[in-house]
Amino acid sequence: MATTVKSRLEAMAKKLRKYSQSHVLQFIDTLDSGGKIALLEELEGLDFELLNELIGRYVLESPEIELPKEILPAPVYPRVPSDELQGKYQKARDHGERMIAEHKVACFTVAGGMGTRLGFEGPKGDYPATPVRNKSLFRVFAESIIASEHRYNCEIPWYIMTSPANHADTVQSFKDHDYFGLNPANVMHFPQGMMPCFGKDGKILMEDKGHLAMSPDGHGGSLRALYKSGALQDMAQRGIEYISYFQVDNPLVYIVDPLFIGLHAMDTAEMSSKAVIKVDPLEKVGNFTVVDGKITVIEYSDLPEEVARKRSADGKLLIESGSIAIHLISRSFVERINQRGFSLPWHRAEKRVPYIDLEGERVVPDGPNAVKLETFVFDAVPLAERSIILAIDRDDQFAPIKNATGVDSVESSHRLQMNRHVKWLEAAGIDIPRKEDGSLNVKVEISPLFALEPEDLVRKKSQLRKLKPEDIVSLG
């Protein structure tokens, strides 16, 4: 073993003794030189002082959520502007369009997941998501970016946060598909950060004799990953000011929304959000609230039921705005909080994690045996000096694919995608064949390359044909 590696291991062994984690080197002598170096590099990448603090607060203990005494509803820009807001909305849209055309907007997708829950082998972004042509999520997003670039005669760089589990496959997929028509120079992939998995005794679990059991640090880690990966520096060099943040599972996301961008910029906001009106008081979405004068998202599991069910005098839910993980973030805000060494709150989750025991035997537990720690991106919202919320129609912009069946499944997403495109066609004057029960008797898919907004179909009405029962239509 080279002297430098030996000295590094000796220094690491000393540190591990200090933090009562010496067991992770128990099998070091069974590894070849490459294996020793790989494990050493994993360990050297950890902040043991921080880990020790987190173990005491979140692993050995299960801290109760301390809710504020006063939880107020958050102010929201309405989906349909009132008479007094119509002028501002038009100015905001015009301003947003100028920001896009001036190359000041970038897209950022959190895409670290695999398609395992969907019965799909590979990165979730490669999952076939559309109802007619089975286009992948990555392709749908790419087409939306390309359509926006054509509309505004600009370049819109796309930053994609992967995970160590899917990074290589994601990069290869983009190469195999010629970057889905985008300029490769405008696409950047980088993996998110990872955290060790802990036994309930606070010990770091080992995946095997040469590797720690690790898990992603949550979508909140995306803001740190932007900084550490060099993506923010790349944005600054390009003159990017605004980051359109969205997660990989929603094929209806309006990626480059000039109204949202304009409202955010005109109100000098730092991190803004889109919201849907909750369909149920206990719907499993984050809740937009105001706490101590700051817009704050409270998880559905943390909001007391009596607060969730409160209604105003007109019968509407008091806390009615739900978070769907769509944000507009100023680049300067991400730079500022990283330069200050920010830390988002950590959240504890008990999970089932296979590991090797002290005898080197692999253990596959029957139930939750470990604690994973992660951060949530919405916890950055109250760090912003100013934040706005724009309400949207969920049927137009939210059709996530999270589950194999049922709610938020590919089936429900296909239905929502077709419903939106049918509504757009009807607005353009196209009759839609329906069955006796009122359900659709056609299958419809509209690419962003053909129409980004319903008004695009109105302008292209001469290119649309009459639909017959059981037609299968793909536009663009």
Image (cartoon, helix red, strand yellow):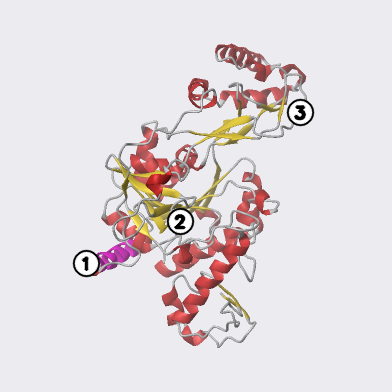
Quote the CA–CA distance across marks 2 and 1: 30 Å
Disc marking residue 389: none
**Image spot of residue 101 (x, y percent):** 37, 63
Report the magenta residues as a range. Answer: 85-99
Give the residue type at disc 3. Answer: Arg
Q: Name the secondary structure under disc 1.
A: helix
The residue under the point 62% across, 54% down is 403
Q: Earlier in the sequence, mark 2 or mark 1?
A: 1
Quadrant containing the C terminus is bottom right
* N-terminal label among 2 and 3: 2
Is 427 on the left or on the right of 294, as rendered? right
Quarter occupied by the N terminus:
top right
**Is residue 244 visible in this depiction of the protein?**
no
* Residue 377 seen in render: yes
Seen at 39% across and 33% down, the residue is 66
Q: What distance separates the C-alpha of mark 3 from that of mark 1?
A: 65 Å
Looking at the magenta stretch, what is its main secondary structure?
Answer: helix
Q: Residues within 10 Å of mark 2 (few under 14, many from 20)?
A: few
Are the residues at dot 3 and dot 1 in contact (C-beta closer than 8 Å)?
no
* Mark 2 element type: loop
Q: Is residue 48 above or below residue 324?
A: above
Within 10 Å of disc 3 (Cα), the crowding (few <14, some 14-19, many 20+) is: some
How many numbered tags mark residues here?
Answer: 3
Foreground: 426 or 93?
426
Q: Nearer the viewer, residue 70 or 345?
A: 70
Q: Which residue is mark 1?
A: 84
Is-magenta flag for residue 240? no
Q: In front here: 212 or 66? A: 66
Residue designated by label 3:
362
Tag 3, which secondary structure? strand
Q: Amino acid at mark 1?
A: Glu
Label 2 sits on what residue type? Asp
